[in-house]
Amino acid sequence: MKTLTETWAESNARFEALLKGLYEDHGEPQSRLFKAMAYSLKAGGKRLRPFLVYQFCLACGGQERDADNAALAVEMIHTYSLIHDDLPAMDNDDYRRGKLTNHKVYGEAMAILAGDGLLTDAFLTLHQAPSLSAEQISSCVGCLAMNAGSWGMVGGQVLDMLSEERELTEEEVRAIQTRKTGCLIKAACCLGVICGQGSVEQLQASMRYADSLGLAFQVRDDMLDVIGDAARLGKAVGVDAGKNTFVRLRGLEGCEKLIAQQTEAACAALSAFPEPGLLSELAHALAYRDH
């Protein structure tokens, strides 16, 4: 059986092949827009969300090709959110994945439009999925919109912004991060189940897995801002000092315990899948990552 590292590398190679040809410069009037979109979309990274789409699709008995467009769509949404998060009006970051942020290369206006383009094209990509039925496409669109929009990721970002001037309770921080980080992870897992024609029970199980995985992922992210290496992370560390993070609420030792609890819960949810593949190992790998 292939290791998690090998499987993830193969998945990423498949995904990167899908990206080739997207937003290439063919002389269109909007070629600068395409360059800005491609700059961030093709900048690499873990490709965690596409990997989750593929793995859940396979766990439900589907094929990777069934999940290609959903994997592209969720990564387009993720990339647009990063472009907008980095803007001066938001987090005002200079580097992302070891490269200058989009607005530092293309300017603020073009960066905003690049994010807008990726957000909208994500749904066009789902609409064009060649191996999905109309019902599957409709379910995928609804799932991604719910988790990416005002009820999900965008809503979480708003809550985060509105809370910057005061200390939050852990319940409030969880509410923010469940939406801001967790919702797109949940979308990826659910999209995989939909593409693999999984059962209602499996869809619900994927949500439980995603909720726990997303929380553990964010807690580890908060820890890495304190103990991480900027060179390995590809971004600055220490930027969350004084912010509403799990480290402030629980300390590093408390965060380790919370990560262990949530990782165990994520793995327990996989009992709904006869062959969950590497999803349990993935949860543990993400919980104790160093970048």
Image (cartoon, rainbow, N blue to C red):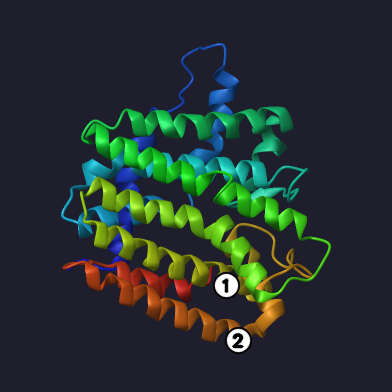
Residue 35 relative to residue 186: left or right:
right
- The one of 64 and 99 positioned closer to us in this rendering: 64
- How far is disc 1 from disc 2 in space, using C-alphas? 10 Å
- The one of 228 and 194 positioned closer to us in this rendering: 194
How many other residues sit within 10 Å of disc 1, few (<14), some (14-19) or many (≥20)? many
Residue 243 relative to residue 24: left or right:
right
Q: Which circle marks residue 95 in the picture?
A: none
Callout 2: SS: helix
Three-letter amino acid code at disc 1? Val
Three-letter amino acid code at disc 2? Gly
- State the quadrant of the N terminus: bottom left
Residue pictured at 67% horizontal, 27% vertical: 110
Work out whether 260 lies above or below 126.
below
On the image, the x and y values in percent for residue 288 come to 48, 76
Q: Which residue position holds label 2?
A: 254
On the image, the x and y values in percent for residue 271 come to 24, 73
Work out whether 216 lies above or below 158.
below
Residue pictured at 25% horizontal, 57% vertical: 200
Image label count: 2
Q: Which circle marks residue 219 in the picture?
A: 1
On the image, the x and y values in percent for residue 40 come to 55, 39
